[in-house]
Image (cartoon, rainbow, N blue to C red):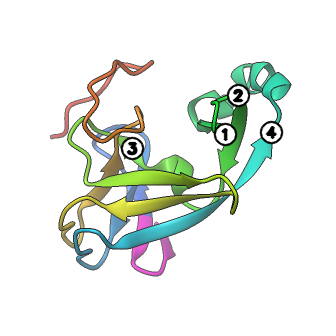
Amino acid sequence: MQRLGSLYIAPSPLGGRGVFTTEPISAGALIEICPVIVLPPEDRAHIHATRLHDYYFIWGEHDRKTAVVLGYGSLFNHSFEPSAEYRPDFQGETLDFYALRQIEAGEEITVNYGGDPRTSRAVWFKMKKPA
């Protein structure tokens, strides 16, 4: 288990690893500010040929660039009923994560990979149901 403040990485019932919290997080609270490494559009094809394929974010005002998100940002698992959302800061080159509701200690923090927490747009992988 790796820890960063009240956040930690642990095996997830949703698959692989996930981000959890040791302390309650209030609705609206900033969870993490993740710096990003912005890559030009032509690098996306290279990323698709690597294990980073499942971990990058589309980036920029016109979705042309790609971003590799540092911190725990690329390890938050997907849910169509997320407990958090991410907001890009294109000028500051960060992806900022905020709680959508109260998140309890020990709970896995999830986001909707579609960007909008309310979207039900299909994802590119088979989802596991939580136990």
Mark toward the viewer: 2 or 3: 2
Q: Distance between the residues labelled 4 and 3?
A: 23 Å
- The residue where tag 3 is placed is 77
- The residue where tag 4 is placed is 39
Query: Is the Cβ of the residue at disc 2 closer than 8 Å to that at disc 4?
Result: no
Q: What SS does tag 4 mark?
A: strand
- The residue where tag 1 is placed is 60
Quadrant of the rendered structure where residue 89 is?
bottom right
- The residue where tag 2 is placed is 64
- The residue located at (39%, 44%) in the rendering is 77
Q: Is residue 72 left or right of residue 11?
A: right
122 or 104, which lies in front?
122
Q: What SS does tag 1 mark?
A: loop
- The residue located at (37%, 63%) in the rendering is 98
Quadrant of the rendered structure where residue 112 is?
top left
- The residue located at (51%, 76%) in the rendering is 4
The three-letter amino acid code for the residue at tag 2 is: Arg
Residue range (magenta) = 1-8
